[in-house]
Image (spheres, rainbow, N blue to C red):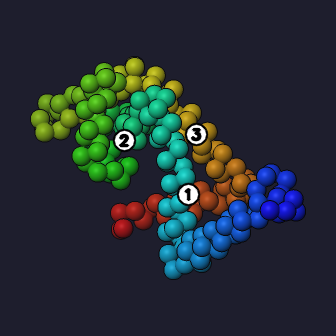
Amino acid sequence: MKATDIDLEGNDTEDREEATAGDAVFDAIVTNGPLNDAWRLTLWSNYYTEPVFTEMMETFDVSRDEFNVLACLSIVGAMTAKKICEVTGRPKNSISRAVNRLAERKMIRRKTNADDRREIRLALNESGQRLYERVLPVALDRQTMMLGALDENERTVLDRILDKLMSTRRTW
């Protein structure tokens, strides 16, 4: 290898060519493919969720679905697991496991509806609220970093687009 084949960061020409080829594949599939919108939304979500939920698990021993339960109960207050499933789009069995684990850890409490014993409302305990407040910055920091490429006007437009898309979620 000649000295001219090495860039300032120590990457050689072969690495640059591989990166360029990778960009071409990315563009062909993600940017210009027939499912480009779905790919881009999915990839954006994956680049958000994977690091966030990995850090939450490693640092706080909180899974994705546990975070979803904590967030729903913190933001809205008491609700059923069924409602959490509807809001988050997560499967019933995943939310059920999260609820059981949070209850075992004494982060949430369950209260059976006296009028309909089949309905169980969930609510955060103080320890659950404190855990949510400790975990939330992980998600917020990642969101802020990933949306940092947008200026204020673009962020406003993105919010409107996402609101419009989500308003049709019951028809999906």
Seen from the viewer's position, the closer of residues 28 and 81 is 28
| Residue 63 or residue 76, whichever sits in front | 63
Between 43 and 8, the residue placed more toward the observer is 8
Which comes sooner in the sequence, label 2 or label 1? 1
| Three-letter amino acid code of the residue under disc 3 | Leu
Q: Which mark is residue 44?
A: 1
Q: For residue 11, which quarter of the picture?
A: bottom right
Residue name at image x 65 percent, y 61 percent: 157
Check contact, mark 2 vs mark 3: CB within 8 A.
Answer: no
Give the number of the mark in front: 1 or 3: 1
Q: Earlier in the sequence, mark 1 or mark 3?
A: 1
> Which mark identifies residue 65?
2
Q: Is residue 134 visible?
A: yes
For the N terminus, the quadrant is: bottom right
Would you identify the image quadrant in which residue 154 lies?
bottom right
Instruction: Give the residue type that dot 1 points to.
Output: Trp
Left or right of 162, for residue 83 = left
- The residue at the point 20 percent across, 35 percent down is 120
In space, the residues marked 2 and 1 are separated at their CA atoms by 19 Å
Q: Give the crowd class for mark 2: few <14, some 14-19, many >=20 residues within 10 Å.
A: many
Say which quadrant the C terminus sits in: bottom left
Residue 47 picture location, percent across and down? 55, 52
Tell me the number on the disc at residue 140: 3
